[in-house]
Image (cartoon, helix red, strand yellow):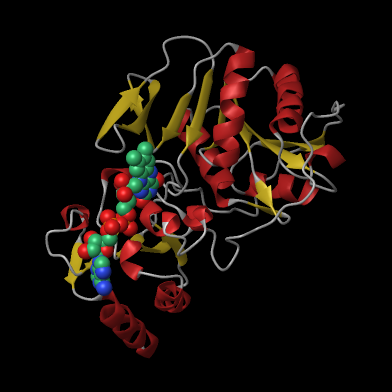
Amino acid sequence: MTKLLVITENRDGELRNVSFEAVAAAKKMNEAAEVVGVVLGSGNLEKLGNEIIRFGADRAITVSHEKLEDYTSEGYGQAVLAVIEDESPDGIVMGHTSIGKDLTPKLAAKLDSGLISDVVDISDEDGQPAFTRPIYSGKAFEKKVIAEGSTLVTIRPNNIKPLEEDESRNGEVISKDVDIADARTIIKDVIRKASEGVDLSEANVVIAGGRGVKSEEGFRPLYELAEVLGAAVGASRGACDAEYCDYALQIGQTGKVVTPDLYIAVGISGAIQHLAGMSNSKVIVAINKDPEANIFNVADYGIVGDLFEVVPKLTEELRQL
Ligand code: FAD
């Protein structure tokens, strides 16, 4: 029987949504496969093991170690490789997150396998899974199949729908002990700069500000709108470079990739490098005073106007609903 490992991610004692999406992706790759959720961290991880099973994994393996409290590629790498050695999976699926982007190339090198990254869809090609991924900064899509060897895949968050949680699903949660050698890097402190509100990479609604917001204070109306919509706030690199906000908010080719249901671009021109991070959003709304701005070419709805008038009005109207 085909066996697929899903490397889950957790934060503050909760599994991240992309972990459930990765389970659904594994099932899409092969409905008959045994899907094994791998939970890494410190403390008791049984609850998370059971949760990944409720979202579709057939069983779960937890590896708890004080050196896995925070992500390091050396620590996680050792733990995952130990699980791989035990399980000999036919494939591995993980989120295309900052952790997934760091860990999977190392796994591919160690396992001498290929890697298909940033997958947005999985279809069936003559009985084989075919992986769709964006190329040329999202201008085109390619479809790849694996010719030989094991499958290592990262999936872009918010693209593959998780399975419904089902309390009646059950499976074994096995706790595995792994010796983790001292890493050359040690996390001494984690400083969360962009922890205000909703997590940007998993948000259903994103409001992003560009250089057009003109100052740090100019972001205030965007935060007010975000509060009404339960949205996360993001930014263009233009806004980050101008020090209106932290780089943790940057969306684009060299920033985060987001695929929310609704993306509101405020005072953003729509440079190709910005589009690379958001053009797959389901509905795009652009607010810009320049009717020729490139962002209108990808927008489903456009408002030509001064953002300092439009955004507060929008917030006021939405508050009435
Ligand atoms: P601008 O291009 O200056 O646009 C500001 C917009 O605001 C204009 O369209 C203007 O009409 C509008 N505006 C001004 N005032 C108002 C107002 N009062 N009301 C309404 N609208 C108003 N960029 C990214 O975003 N993400 C990336 O990851 C990224 N990576 C890059 C990587 C490389 C290698 C390079 C070379 C560039 C990268 N860039 C990236 C930068 C990118 O090329 C653009 O410079 C940047 O996206 C521009 O940001 P912006 O749209 O906020 O600013």
Residue that appears at 79% across and 39% down: 68
From this view, report whether residue 145 is shown above or below residue 198: above
From this view, report whether residue 137 is shown above or below residue 244: above
Query: Residue lying farthest left?
Result: 292
Q: Is residue 287 left or right of residue 121?
A: left
Viewport quadrant of the C terminus? bottom left
Viewport quadrant of the N terminus? top right
Task: Please state which of residues 9 and 75 is positioned toward the viewer in this rendering.
Answer: 75
Residue 244 shows in this picture: yes
Residue 28 appears in which quarter of the rendering?
A: top left
Q: Is residue 146 left or right of residue 299?
A: right
Residue 281 shows in this picture: no
From the top left corner, tell me how far across and down residue 109 is, in percent: 59, 15
From the top left corner, tell me how far across and down residue 203 is, in percent: 47, 59
From the top left corner, tell me how far across and down residue 305 is, in percent: 19, 75
Task: Please state which of residues 217 and 70 is positioned toward the viewer in this rendering.
Answer: 217
Task: Please state which of residues 221 and 176 is positioned toward the viewer in this rendering.
Answer: 221
Number of on-image labels? 0
